[in-house]
Amino acid sequence: GELPLALQAKLLHFLENGSYRAVGASVASSSDVRVVAATNRDLADDVQSGRFREDLFYRLNVITLDIPALRERGEDVLLLAQHFSRRQAVEEGVEPIRFLPDSVQALARHRWPGNVRELKNLIERLT
């Protein structure tokens, strides 16, 4: 969504042909890759407003997975917090966080504007 149109054209060319020219190179190279792309923007709106190339949109939009924001998945907040806490505890050789009822309620009430990254960062600081 935020990739300049000129770079969108280059990305589309690479996806269509598998060839690219590295900066400073005199010959093109090729690569056979699969691309997984993610965005938090509505690319269909960006196509309509001219901020995103329609041909690139359809080239990338083969399989779409819509994942709701963390604030819309309240039941996942505690599970993710526990997961991040256990993982961080193993890395640091400490006990994972015990989530008391008040902290569980606070986690559920928070809007999580930074989504899962915000939760992960919080748990890492607390562990």
Image (tube, rainbow, N blue to C red):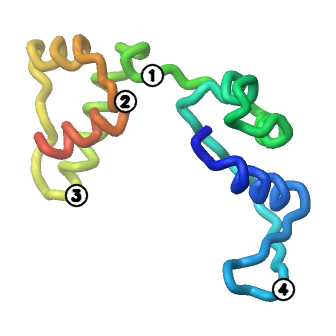
**Gap in angstroms between the C-alphas marked 3 and 4:** 45 Å
Whether label 2 touches label 3, CB < 8 Å: no
Residue 115, numbered label: 2
Tag 3 residue: 91
**Gap in angstroms between the C-alphas marked 2 and 3:** 23 Å
Q: Return the disc, 3 or 4, that comes first in the chain's sequence.
A: 4
Q: Amino acid at mark 1?
A: Ala
Q: Secondary structure at mark 1?
A: loop
Q: Return the disc, 4 or 2, that comes first in the chain's sequence.
A: 4
**Gap in angstroms between the C-alphas marked 4 and 1:** 43 Å
Tag 4 residue: 27
Number of the front mark, 3 or 1: 1
Q: Return the disc, 2 or 3, that comes first in the chain's sequence.
A: 3
Residue 79: % across, % down: 33, 26
Q: Return the disc, 1 or 2, that comes first in the chain's sequence.
A: 1
Q: Is residue 67 above or below residue 37?
A: above
Judged left or right of residue 25, residue 86 is: left
Whether label 1 touches label 2, CB < 8 Å: yes
Tag 1 residue: 69
Badge 4: residue crowd in 10 Å (few <14, some 14–19, many ≥20) = few
Query: Residue placed at 84% from the left, 58% from the top?
Result: 13
Q: Amino acid at mark 2?
A: Asn
Q: Secondary structure at mark 2?
A: helix
Number of the front mark, 2 or 3: 2
Query: Residue placed at 79% from the left, 53% from the top?
Result: 9
